[in-house]
Amino acid sequence: MKRTLKYYRIMWLKHDLPAGLSVFLVALPLCLGIALASGAPLYAGLLSGIIGGLVVSFISGSQLAVSGPAAGLSTVVAASIITLGDYRLFLLTVIIAGLFQLILGVLKLGVIANYFPSAVIKGMLAAIGIILISKQIPLALGYDQPDFWRSGFLNLFSSHEIVDHFKHFSLHLRRGAIVISTVSILILFLYQSRYAQTLKIKVIPAPLLIVIIGIITDLIFSQFASDYSLKPTQLVTVPSNIFSDIIFPDLSQFFSSIHIWKDGLIIGILASLETLLCVEAIDKLDKQNRITPVNRELVAQGIGNMTCGLLGAIPITAVIVRGAANVDAGGRTKLSAFTHGLFLLLAVLLVPFLLNKIPYASLASILLVTGYNLAKPKLFRHMFNLGLKQFLPFVITIIVILATDLLIGVSIGLLISLYLIIQSNFKTEYKITHTKVLHIDTYLIKLNTNVTFLNKVKLRNALDEIPEYSELIIDGSECHFVDYDILEIISEYQAKAHDRHIAVHLKGIESVNVTAVH
């Protein structure tokens, strides 16, 4: 025990303390930005980051993953808050999501992510990216009117009054916000370019640099170019004491609406998928080749999200950006994630006045580039080049999510993928060839690797079309699996074939006693 404590103390001082500080600098603007994109109070994003750092890291078995609010959940959270109409009711969905994750972990269902086709998952993330972009463009341009907060960017331009809406929109733009956003986006893309290593600019985390530049630029505008300075409504507003302003869930309304449970299930599934995909990616970055126990991770995330719901925070997942920053900064153990949560707590307690100088345009720029990274044109080209079976569920998932909601979009995407799999099985389970041997029609049905019940009807019809006075060879020598239903059809046909003067020969197929099942 003493040796373990000594090991963690050395790791913390040497590696995890500086890594935790680095992750904190990345996470702080992201917590605020994702809360903003979610339509939740900004303090809720900070609370989520604190809970992800202090609670989840303590329970989790992952040494390098870092949890907090995720951009991938922001569109679902925003839609849920609007649908339910009350943030206290939304917090109930977060508790339900956490409970769902906890049950998944206890039942050892951490392999669930392996059963979602990658085309559907990529389509879901691309749709989230598109929605994220559409909702952050107004903020990046300085638009701060209440109708945006209620309806979102796309609804500002109805087909009936598009000209009036455009005029109204243009009247509320702010040149200072546009300058900050433009500079911020250029810097973020520079960080992602191949020149970043050459210029050695990655010493400062990109989100932190964007926030610093935004604050300094607005201070310069307010002193020397007042027309460009930002209004108070275009700056972050965090209470000086967030713990006195926390909104708590209304536990008496748990069963008041089916939407609470539906949204909780959606958030639970999405948060679980994002977490499992993230820890898999982070494990690949671990130089010590440690593997995260996925069921324990789901339990940790479940407890974390239940805590978020009870304390007024938005839902959390393991986040690839934070985890990658942790690895890059030299993190060794889960203490780095815990330390980042501790730094977030200290920032909220000690320097809320600094947070209130951050322009919304800076946060919107970070989220715009995040959305772009989720829905890059390169991704669409890649999926198209993979062929119709990958591209079709990918693009249909995107379209349906944009037209309806995430649950319906993912469900339709899964159905399309399933249909394509079934269709593929119908086409490839067997081949029929026809030859003449000594003036006798000879038919060969060669079964492929796996023959399932899905092809019962087609196989039965093919057998019925074999003409009288023929010879039939059914070759299953290369089969790894033949469904019992298929064996039953073959045995039934073999038993009756002599009535039509058809000689049936089986190769590599066991006979089934059909009468035994009746």
Image (cartoon, rainbow, N blue to C red):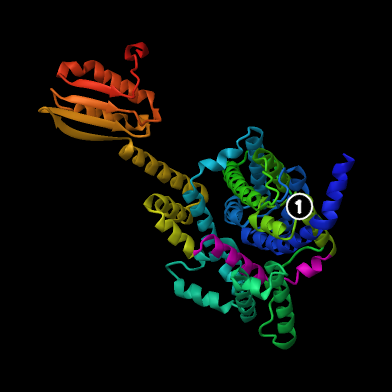
Front residue of 116 and 249: 116
From the viewer's perspective, tell me whether residue 244 is left or right of residue 443. right
Residue 319 drawn at (x, y percent): 65, 54
Q: Residue furthest bottom?
A: 224
Residue on which the image places disc 1: 332
Q: Residue furthest right?
A: 2
Residue 436 drawn at (x, y percent): 14, 31
Residue 293 picture quarter: top right
User: Is 456 part of what is drawn in magenta?
Assistant: no
Residue 265 picture quarter: top right
Task: Determine if residue 143 is in view.
Answer: no
Front residue of 464 and 217: 464
Give the residue displayed 83% in from the left and 57% down from the top. 14
Q: Is residue 77 above or below residue 256?
A: below
Residue 217 drawn at (x, y percent): 71, 80
Q: Is residue 504 above or below residue 312?
A: above
Residue 356 drawn at (x, y percent): 76, 69
Front residue of 498 and 227: 498
Position of the C terminus, as image quadrant, is: top left
Give the residue displayed 76% in from the left and 52% down from the top. 332
Query: How busy is the neighbourhood of tag 1: few (under 14 within 10 Å), some, or many (20 plus)?
Result: many
User: Is 373 part of what is drawn in magenta?
Assistant: yes
Position of the N terminus, as image quadrant, is: top right
Front residue of 72 and 518: 518
Residue 97 picture quarter: top right
